[in-house]
Image (cartoon, grey):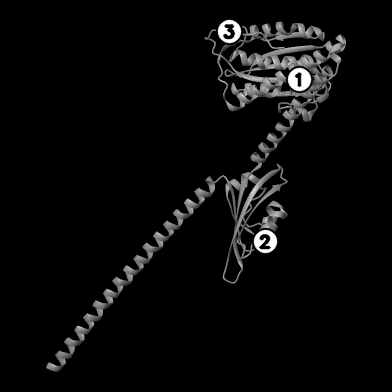
Amino acid sequence: MLATLLCLLLALAGLAVHLAWRHRFRQLQQAHQEALQRWATTHARLAHEAQTRLTAVLNLLGEGILLLDEQNRILLANPAFRTLFQPHTAPEGQTLLATLRWHELDQLTRELQPDLPALTRELAWAGPPERWLRISAAALFDPAGRRLHTILVFSDLTRIKQLQRVRQEFVANVSHELRTPLSHIKGYVETLLSGAASDPALQQRCLQTIARNANRLELLIEDLLTLAQLESGQVALQLRPVSLPDFVGKILQDFQPRAASRQVQLHSEVPPLQVRADPLRLEQVLANLLDNAIKYGRHGGHVHVRARSLSPEFVEVAVADDGPGLPPEACERVFERFYRVDKARSREQGGTGLGLAIVKHIVQRHGGRVWVESQPGHGATFYFTLPAAAETEPAGSTPTRPTQP
């Protein structure tokens, strides 16, 4: 009986121990699962944060970024890449060659090797639009030498290349523009020194040519200095309200003798409008446009100055002639420095090729814009906008200095 009771107690004790360990095992298993769940949640959160940071960085980068797989298929393209190349469809999943059709770039990625995992090249992309790009390429290889991924970084050099070309063209143009009058001056001085001074008629002709070319040099240098000051922001505008009808009327009066020499009639069609402008700079703008309209318009023709209110903030002014007009390609480039539609005629008329460039910079400094509309054989109209003046402000009426010839 005692033995039976002892066996029963031992069995109960064993069962209790088993149940206790089983309960503990379940607690440990649940704690392990909760720990795994917390680890998975933390891992997902950290991965999401890392992906968010990476996406933010890629979105903010000004350089285009491409990530390629081993088959040169695009895995990732950032917004800067899309802005730079503007692909017609989403590039992800397509090959590099199918997306850009740029064989030089595809060849660049295939030149990457385990012993040469990174390359940088400057390549021209035909576009449109045409661009110059610095491309940095780097590849990741496995121990067997198989390329796993390739990253491409595109830096747009187009603006830098354009500025370099403009600078080179500017230096070449300035050199040419200075060389022509200097060679004339030197030639006629040598003529005088070789004995022409004893011939009064020849002497007079030589001195007149020297004076004319010296004046041309002076005008060119003045225009170059003005343009340099405008581009560098060194010109401080003295803004004040200006009454357009009175202002235009005074300038047209100053240009009347020059217009009469070509039998050109000047017309003002300016309503009572006020602009906020620097009178001296506004005079330069109108003087340049009127001078061009008279010189290059039709002999015996008409030049009209018009104005209208575009909005409460801006006024549009137009100078129109009825001359031969401009070809379409010239309308895009006429405001460039030293650009001339007819180079021979422009030099004969005494132009420096900088007047319209000065006009553009002055108008832009006022916060406006300038453009031209023309059809060959139907004249040209130059437009520019200026800020409108408040109606309560008293307006000045006339330029403060005479118009330069």
Which SS class for mark 3? Answer: loop
- Residue name at image x 61 percent, y 18 percent: 386
Q: Which residue is mark 1?
A: 351
Disc nearer the start of the sequence (3/1): 1
In depth, the one of 395 and 188 nearer the eye is: 188
In depth, the one of 262 and 319 nearer the eye is: 262
Q: Mark 2 to mark 3: distance in Å?
A: 69 Å
Q: Is residue 378 visible?
A: no
What percent of the width, then of the height, locates residue 167? 68, 34
Eyeballing the image, is 96 above or below 156? below
What percent of the width, then of the height, locates residue 278? 59, 15
What percent of the width, then of the height, locates residue 231? 61, 27
Mark 2–mark 3 CB contact (< 8 Å): no
What percent of the width, then of the height, locates residue 28? 30, 72
**Quick one: quadrant of the C terminus?**
top right
Disc nearer the start of the sequence (1/2): 2
Task: Name the kind of residue labelled 2 in the image.
Answer: Glu
Q: Which residue is mark 3?
A: 396
Task: Name the kind of residue labelled 3 in the image.
Answer: Gly
Disc 2 versus disc 3: nearer the observer = 2
Disc 1 versus disc 2: nearer the observer = 1
**Quick one: quadrant of the N terminus?**
bottom left
Q: Is residue 395 visible?
A: yes
Picture quadrant of residue 246: top right
- Residue name at image x 83 percent, y 15 percent: 206
**Local crowd at mark 3 within 10 Å, few (<14), some, or many (≥20)?**
some
Disc nearer the start of the sequence (2/3): 2
Picture quadrant of residue 192: top right
Q: Which residue is mark 2?
A: 111
**Local crowd at mark 1 within 10 Å, few (<14), some, or many (≥20)?**
some
